[in-house]
Image (cartoon, grey):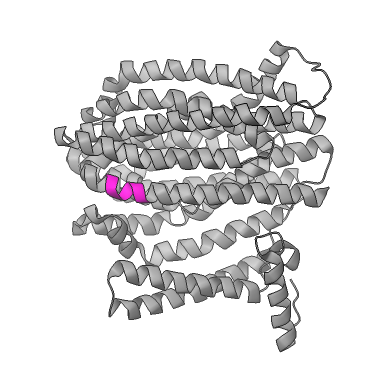
């Protein structure tokens, strides 16, 4: 039973990972033409609106999917499918009411909000945000419902539908409206976001209609009343929503603080918005790309842990999960740190201005460490929430958030300027992740094994050396884009090979990944050939 549970968890995480990678890839590619269409000022305006949109979206629906997945997983363990559907219905109604209220607030207060942010041109972007928030909120209920059954395919497919249509429609509307000015272009991009959410919601609703029949089986009658379940749903949702709210709230506060602090330091509104656009729109997007791996695991962890607790089964091995996080994050940090200038230059041609290019490169070097901190924060939060410790996770991230705001005020207005925002973020995420790890070690029996992490560092350094060497050779003949792509592909291959040779993953862990059994066979033959003793 435990192997079946772990296989279902691994399969769900893999589906979300593949879907998330596709979405992140589309999103990263989307940022390139969008940045070029809107220009630095336009993307800065877009980034003033988007954190506020994200904040209100979290307020409306942030804890809904996670809380619903926990409740549905618990119902599934008891065979209470009708009750699970009741929770879905209640969640949809709550989300619809709250999101309509927030949509009205966007329409009514978009102007004052944009003035308070330091750029009145952002007001038009809130019109597009008002459309998007309703549909983006409601679809999270369907995602949470399917995740509770550990069926991650609808979530992954809906995310891909959302990203593809955002790419097509966002760029189309931005291109059509940019002629009227950067603010109109940013509004067009937000309208594209809203249209993509509508189609993603339609897909999920149709999928639910077909899947529902397969779930109708004999089951016990619901013993709880409608109002009791509604109270339970709200009780579960509230702390998770507040937890999910903290970081978007910090980003929203950044959108208010940073531009105004830069202006007060002597920069013009346009230059300040450009710098904020490079930091928030370009650099942070690159940092968030590798974290799709940890997000996929985190989403799968909550219902898996909740189901296991209800069945009184052993939870998944946390040490293996943390090992995976380091395995993905460490090489990405090294690559971003050493190739920051080349990555910014290739991906964002609009930053051809040498000042903007140097700005983005240094910001990326400073922010690269956040790949690890954000990943650890996502995983530890999911483990705490799955084990009923949502309030502890909320307290930890709140402490870190307050420190982040104070540091931003001091650093950005001081000698660091825009770089102070990146430094404050790194400190914030490290504190939040560290407090979560301390809480986990206090509440549960788990450990992080440092021997595999050492070899991950060693493997990453070797692969980085290969990447630097081949990039130098390829630059003698090829363009920057081709050189980076091929050098990183070769380095990635070296990283995978040494991952098998070095004592990083044991045979059981390798066997759970696609083609894992063949990799284990190859590994054993390799060690037998050279008469090595493998000891992990």
Q: Kindly report the secondary structure that dominates the magenta region of the rendered protein.
A: helix
Residue 467 lies, in percent from the top left, at: 42, 74
Who's the residue at 18% across and 40% down the image? 270
| Drawn side of residue 74 relative to residue 24, left or right | right
Q: Which residues are magenta?
A: 29-34
Name the residue: 66% across, 26% down: 236
Residue at x 41%, y 48% (from the top left corner): 26
Give the farthest residue toward the bottom: 530
| Whole-percent x, y for residue 267 in the image | 18, 43
Compare residues 435 and 95 and report the one nearer the observer: 95
Res 356 → quadrant: bottom left
What residue is at 78 percent from the left and 40 percent from the top? 308
- Vertical arrangement, residue 29 with respect to residue 518, above or below: above
Residue 257 at least partly seen = no
Which quadrant would the C terminus be assigned to in this image?
bottom right
Relative to the observer, which residue lies in front, 212 or 132? 212
The answer to whether residue 234 is magenta is: no
Q: Tell how many labels.
A: 0
- Work out whether residue 397 or residue 8 is closer to the camera in this orientation and state it: 8
């Amino acid at each position: 039973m435990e192997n079946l549970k772990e296989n279902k968890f691994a399969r769900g995480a893999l589906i979300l990972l593949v879907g998330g990678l596709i979405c992140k890839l589309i999103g990263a590619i989307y940022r390139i033409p969008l940045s070029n269409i809107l220009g630095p000022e336009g993307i800065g305006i877009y980034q003033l609106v988007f954190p506020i949109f994200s904040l209100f979206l979290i307020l409306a629906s942030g804890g809904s999917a996670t809380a619903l997945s926990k409740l549905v997983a618990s119902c599934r363990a008891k065979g209470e499918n009708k009750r699970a559907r009741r929770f879905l219905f209640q969640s949809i109604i709550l989300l619809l009411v709250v999101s309509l209220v927030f949509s009205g607030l966007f329409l009514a207060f978009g102007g004052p909000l944009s003035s308070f942010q330091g750029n009145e041109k952002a007001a038009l972007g809130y019109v597009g945000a008002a459309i998007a928030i309703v549909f983006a909120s409601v679809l999270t209920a369907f995602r949470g419902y399917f995740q509770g059954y550990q069926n991650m395919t609808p979530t992954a497919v809906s995310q891909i539908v959302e990203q593809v249509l955002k790419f097509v429609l966002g760029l189309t509307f931005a291109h059509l409206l940019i002629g009227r000015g950067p603010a109109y272009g940013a509004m067009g991009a937000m309208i594209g976001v809203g249209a993509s959410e509508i189609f993603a919601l339609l897909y999920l609703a149709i999928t639910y209609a077909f899947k529902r029949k397969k779930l109708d089986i004999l089951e016990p009658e619901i013993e709880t009343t409608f109002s009791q379940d509604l109270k339970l749903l709200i009780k579960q949702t509230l702390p998770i929503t507040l937890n999910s709210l903290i970081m978007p709230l910090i980003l929203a506060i950044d959108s208010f603080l940073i531009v105004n602090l830069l202006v007060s330091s002597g920069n013009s509104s346009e230059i300040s918005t450009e710098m904020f656009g490079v930091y928030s729109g370009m650099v942070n997007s690159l940092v968030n790309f590798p974290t799709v791996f940890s997000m996929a695991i985190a989403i799968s962890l909550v219902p898996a842990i909740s189901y296991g607790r209800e069945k009184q089964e052993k939870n998944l091995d946390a040490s293996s999960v943390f090992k995976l996080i380091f395995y993905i994050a460490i090489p990405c940090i090294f690559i971003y740190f050493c190739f920051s200038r080349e990555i910014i230059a290739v991906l964002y041609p609009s930053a051809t201005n040498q000042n903007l290019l140097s700005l983005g490169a240094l910001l990326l070097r400073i922010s690269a460490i956040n790949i690890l901190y954000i990943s650890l924060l996502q995983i530890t939060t999911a483990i705490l929430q799955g084990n009923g410790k949502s309030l502890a996770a909320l307290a930890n991230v709140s402490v870190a958030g307050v420190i982040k705001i104070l540091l931003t005020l001091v650093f950005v207005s001081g000698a660091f300027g825009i770089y102070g925002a990146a430094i404050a973020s790194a400190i914030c995420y490290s504190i939040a992740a560290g407090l979560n790890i301390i809480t986990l070690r206090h509440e549960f029996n788990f450990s992080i094994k440092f021997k595999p992490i050492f070899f991950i560092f060693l493997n990453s350094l070797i692969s980085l050396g290969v990447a630097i060497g081949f990039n130098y050779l390829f630059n003698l003949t090829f363009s920057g884009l081709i050189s980076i792509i091929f050098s990183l592909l070769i380095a990635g291959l070296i990283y995978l090979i040494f991952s098998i040779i070095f004592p990083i993953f044991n045979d059981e862990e390798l066997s759970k990944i696609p083609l894992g059994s063949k990799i284990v066979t190859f590994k054993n033959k390799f060690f037998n050939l050279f008469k090595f003793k493998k000891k992990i």
